Image (cartoon, grey):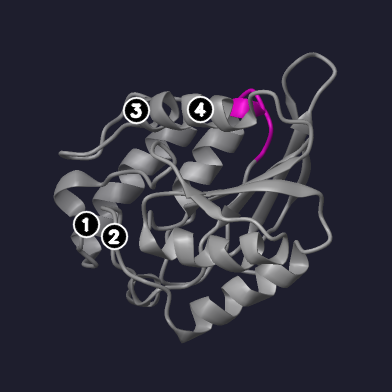
Amino acid sequence: MRLLLVRHGQTDSNVGGALDTRPPGAPLNVLGLAQAAAVGERLATEQVTAVYASLATRAQQTAAPIAAAHGLEVTVIEGVHEVFVGDLEGRADAAARETFDAVYDAWWAGDLEARLPGGESAEDVRARFLPALERVLDGTTDDVVVVSHGAAIRLVAAALLGDTAETWYVPNTGLVVLEPAEDGGWKLEHWDRAVAVPRDVTAGGTPD
């Protein structure tokens, strides 16, 4: 059994660097739809028995080709949506990005209780995302795909790996594959890494 975490494809919010976290959010743009089709082809030979997506339109659109390749339906679940940025929602200005960066950096420095203004902390994200994963993984022995969002995937992967392993920015339709470890935890099998972090995102990736 493996957990395959997939970030959604590109949206116009990504291109414009907007903080787009409230579902349903922006749909995939033309490139995003092509990326979704490509990741569906990429995962067509995996032993996938279930495909889940967040409440966001872009996640569901990305999940659709993956599910179709396996004759499955996309199951939409709560709890795996992006970090909610609260008062920064919809903004793409430098001040908003600086505020987000400061909180995001605090999380990676170990302060998981640092909170975005009017939004969530890293602890909040993990408190809703991890139980959702437990529910979808319960009793499964095959690969499960969860299509989610960049910042949320990185935060949750770090939690599952014990907050000791290095993690990276997740590009659009990037894949993070985790498998059970002998000690009962998780280990990293694969992490898609961007050749370079796009200029329109922070080092961790704009939450979207």
> Which image quadrant is residue 111 in?
top left
In the picture of the structure, the residue carrying the numbered disc 1 is: 96
> Which image quadrant is residue 64 in?
bottom right
Q: Evaluate if marks 2 and 1 touch, with contact meaning CB atoms under 8 Å apart.
A: yes
Mark 1: amino acid? Ala
In the picture of the structure, the residue carrying the numbered disc 2 is: 19
In the picture of the structure, the residue carrying the numbered disc 4 is: 130
Q: Please state the extent of the stretch shown in magenta in the rendering.
A: 159-166
Q: Is residue 172 visible?
A: no
Task: Kindly give the residue lying farthest to the top in the view shown.
Answer: 183
Report the mark closest to the observer, 2 or 1: 2
* Mark pair 4, 3: CA separation: 10 Å
Apparent side of residue 156 relative to residue 50 in the rendered image (left or right) = left
* Mark pair 2, 4: CA separation: 23 Å
> Mark 4 or mark 3, which has the lower sequence index?
3
| Circle 2: element type | loop
Q: Pick the residue in front: 88 or 57.
A: 57
Report the mark closest to the observer, 4 or 1: 4
Mark 4: amino acid? Leu
| Circle 4: element type | helix
Q: Is residue 142 visible?
A: yes
Residue 124 tag number: 3
Q: Evaluate if marks 2 and 3 touch, with contact meaning CB atoms under 8 Å apart.
A: no
